[in-house]
Amino acid sequence: MESTKSLLVGLFFALFAIYVLLAVPFGSYYQPIIVMIAIPFGIVGAVLGHMLMGYSLSLMSMMGIVALCGVVVNDSLILIDYTNRLRREGISSLEAIYQAGRRRFRPILLTTLTTFGGLSPMIFETSRQARFMIPMAISLGFGILFATSITLVLVPCLYIIAEDVLRFIRRLLPFSRELTLLELLPKERS
């Protein structure tokens, strides 16, 4: 009980650290949330993986889920970073997210498959010595597989929704200056 409680505290600190580490380079408060939206789907994937493999959730599974939180944001980060780069070049938000999805699909897919492939020997191990670590590997492997499939659809949608919300705010406040995601993006440092 005490270990689970401290693990949950560690999870919240890890999520906060991930948010801060993403907010600083993005120079934005909402883009890290778009990137981190894949985390709950990774947790769902971890639970589904345990059900599929016939394991119950354990303390090691929870440790794997905490580790998964850091790994699963990579795919979203690749997508949003490339979109921001295209936006700085003057491409519209819709076209930028479309091109980012097309150009970063292969790196995102390869990252996910190589991570799962690296964990699969441990996931499918049958020896008695490995039984202790298998739940952690299941959490990481199946979590990243599930989160990637959701990320490739959900993150572009959320990016466009954020642009639409800013456009709506601009219409509500006509006296305010033009406000777009492009203006909120951090400028290139020279």
Image: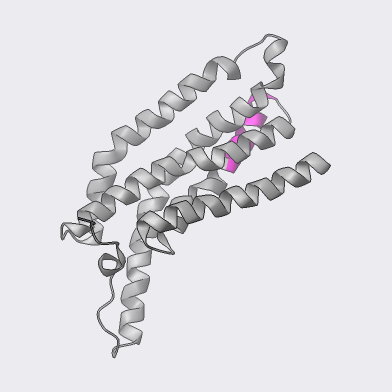
State left or right for residue 47 relative to residue 172. Answer: right
Judge whether residue 57 can be spotted in this image. Answer: no
Residue 47 highlighted magenta (yes or no): yes
Where residue 136 sits: x, y (%)? 64, 28
The magenta stretch spans which residues?
43-54
Judge whether residue 85 can be spotted in this image. Answer: yes
Residue, x 70% and y 47% (percent of image)?
Answer: 8
Residue at the far right: name it. 1
Image quadrant in which you'd find residue 172:
bottom left
Where residue 49 sits: x, y (%)? 61, 31
The majority secondary structure of the magenta stretch comes to helix
Quadrant in which the C terminus appears: bottom left
Where residue 17 sits: x, y (%)? 54, 51
Residue, x 49% and y 38% (percent of image)?
Answer: 71
Image height check: is 61 above or below 78? above
Name the foreground residue: 111 vs 153: 111
State left or right for residue 67 relative to residue 27. Answer: right
Where residue 126 sits: x, y (%)? 66, 10
Residue 181 highlighted magenta (yes or no): no
Name the foreground residue: 165 vs 133: 133
Name the foreground residue: 148 vs 80: 80
Name the foreground residue: 1 vs 145: 1
Coloring scheme used: one colour
State left or right for residue 9 relative to residue 102. Answer: right
Image height check: is 87 above or below 53? below
